[in-house]
Image (cartoon, rainbow, N blue to C red):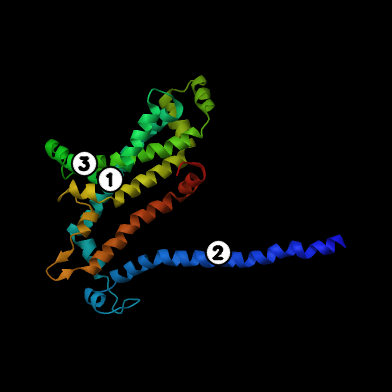
Amino acid sequence: MTDTAFAPTAAAPRRRALPRVKGSAVVMALYLLFLMLPIYWLVNMSLKTNTEITSTFTLWPRNLTFANYVTILTDPSWYMGYVNSLIYVVMNTAISITVALPAAYAFSRYTFLGDKHLFFWLLTNRMAPPAVFALPFFQLYSSVGLFDTHIAVALAHCLFNVPLAVWILEGFMRGVPKEIDETAYIDGYSFPRFFVKIFMPLIASGIGVAAFFCFMFSWVELLLSRTLTSVNAKPIAATMTRTVSASGMDWGVLAAAGVLTIIPGALVIYFVRNYIAKGFALGRV
């Protein structure tokens, strides 16, 4: 009698869970549709002519054309923008990670006078808007001859990427027991050898996460990169803001440039996806 009486009660939650699962799937599908719709529309516009874009509303190109992509890939004023952006973004990512690794190790392993205040000051540089530093950087780089160079933009982006990398890496390093450091010193490892061969592999996921965020924040930043460059190192973001001609806005070329701008970020996400997943699970992300 007792088992029979409680049997419907035990089965009831399972029956009620099915609509919840279906509801969650519907919400997720709608959310993904909401995210992918702007990307689809950007690709849709990039495969149309300006006449079709400005005259009619269509869900797909009626006269499919790749002329917009050909313009970008054959015109130096366009494709050099991508080259310039990739150069200073890679330089900034390498510099930021190289500087942040020893700094994060010091914050995670040692206690010194003003360490918390210094750590907070680093984070305030990340919080400050780039517009605050645009004019000082412009005057400084013009004085020392670094204006319109890739290293100028790379160093300027270190202002907000180094604190971010230090903050992320410090969280990962705190998760590594200090006994590993002491054991390595007892075994005769020098600090550089220990740091490169033992410690860095333990925080590889943290390095991947920090490098990803440094790459993405440097790639999408516009104000400093546009202010500190003019011709030789002008990034693609600055080029995209100058698409107005005598005939009006070149919407098709601008859309194609937007599609090509998404590709580097998507590739970076693909190659570091495992590190990002571990970072969200273990680190300070």
Q: Secondary structure at mark 3?
A: helix
Q: Which residue is mark 3?
A: 152
Q: Secondary structure at mark 1?
A: loop
Q: Quadrant of the N terminus?
A: bottom right
N-term mark: 3 or 2: 2
Q: Is residue 7 visible?
A: yes
Q: Amino acid at mark 1?
A: Pro
Residue type beneath disc 2: Ser
Q: Residues within 10 Å of mark 2 (few under 14, many from 20)?
A: few
Q: Residue, x 34% and y 54% (percent of image)?
A: 264
The answer to whether the residue labelled 3 contacts the one labelled 1, judged by CB atoms less than 8 Å apart, is no
Residue 193 left/right relative to 257: right
The dot on residue 129 is 1
Residue 162 in view: no
**Residue wearing tag 2:** 24
In the image, is residue 168 above or below residue 49?
above
